[in-house]
Image (spheres, rainbow, N blue to C red):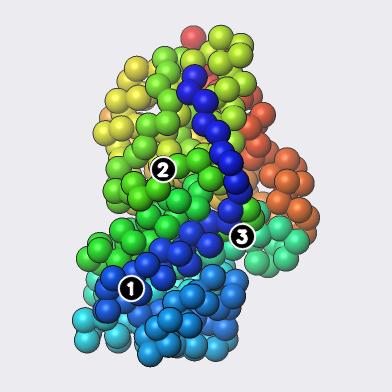
Amino acid sequence: MKKYTYTEKKDTRSGFGAGLHELGKTNEDVVALCADLTGSLKMDAFKNDFPERFFQMGIAEANMINVAAGMTIGGKIPFTGTFANFSTSRVYDQIRQSIAYSGKNVKIAASHSGLTLGEDGATHQVLEDIGMMKMLPNMTVINTCDYNQTKAATIAAAKHDGPVYLRFGRPSIPVFMPEGEFEIGKAVMLNEGTDVTIVATGHLVWEAIQAGEKLAEEGISAEIINIHTIKPLDEEAILKSVGKTGCVVTAEEHQIAGGLGESVSACLTRNLLAPQEFVAVNDTFGESGTPAQLMEKYGLTANDVVAAAKKAIERKG
């Protein structure tokens, strides 16, 4: 089992802010729109250095999406910024009709996703957004795991031709991925193993790494894969791994319905039947609490991944 260490913790939303600022310096077509959450989305540096390319839209998310779609007609690459809940549920009609249907080159930057939004509670803790966005034709869906990956994904999104949903979060978490490495649709092998495949996304990648170390102490070899792109899914990497280990655990900070787990399950159903266990929120809304409290209560910790891995191994006989 490889040892992944970190020297600092940073929030993934700051990775987005750093990536956006870098794009401001390197690509004059990049513009940014925000729905009155500039500080929360870490868009201040872009706003301060490129004020002519920053547009404060106010608390009018639907209008922001439509304006962004219009900007693409003139060759601009707009990034819209607000909380993940407001980036999807509140504006789904506008995304479907004005962006996805015609393949507009809009990048939807969605912060404060999942339970780890924390104390703001269930109304802000969107857990359905990956499912909503991956169902839309033409939409690329990215869910990053740390500061470095979020920065790199932001830069990669600008280079991608077509709509992108970029999902990241609020809390400070370990920084463990290399800087600058990101390929849309290409999974990252974190640890090779033989007994069970653990496929994780977003904040659950670090939990999966910790779970792998716990399993290794018990003599269980876990293959750990970082799936940062939910759509298009790297089915080749998943099938190659599960073909070797014979079972899989999917781990995500999202509803069990509609998320990474369902995408992996559909892939296996079409190609390679194998036992699968899900670490995800089980058909419920969240509640107010610290991120650590919520991860524990809703079964999204490294210990939960360990338990799921053992159950998957038992099922393969």
Note whether 140 is above or below 145 in the view shown.
Answer: below
Note whether 28 is above or below 278 in the view shown.
Answer: below
The amino acid at mark 2 is: Pro
Residue marked by disc 2: 178
Q: Earlier in the sequence, mark 3 or mark 1?
A: 1
The residue nearer to you, when weighing 228 against 304, is: 228
Location of residue 60 in the rendering, given as x and y in whole percent from the top left corner: 52, 87
The amino acid at mark 3 is: Arg
Q: Quadrant of residue 58?
A: bottom right
10 Å crowding of disc 2: few (<14), some (14-19), many (20+) = few
Note whether 120 is above or below 175 in the view shown.
Answer: below
The residue that appears at 52% across and 77% down in the rendered structure is: 44
Residue marked by disc 1: 25
The residue that appears at 45% across and 42% down in the rendered structure is: 177
Residue 275 in view, yes or no: no
Label 2, secondary structure: give it.
loop
| Image-based side of 22 in relation to 16, left or right | left
- Per the rendering, the mark at residue 95 is none
Residue marked by disc 3: 170
Separation of residues labelled 2 and 1 (CA atoms): 22 Å
The amino acid at mark 1 is: Lys
| Image-based side of 47 in relation to 234, left or right | right
Q: Earlier in the sequence, mark 3 or mark 2?
A: 3
Label 1, secondary structure: give it.
helix
Are the two marked residues, 2 and 1, in contact with CB atoms closer than 8 angstroms? no
The residue nearer to you, when weighing 221 against 275, is: 221
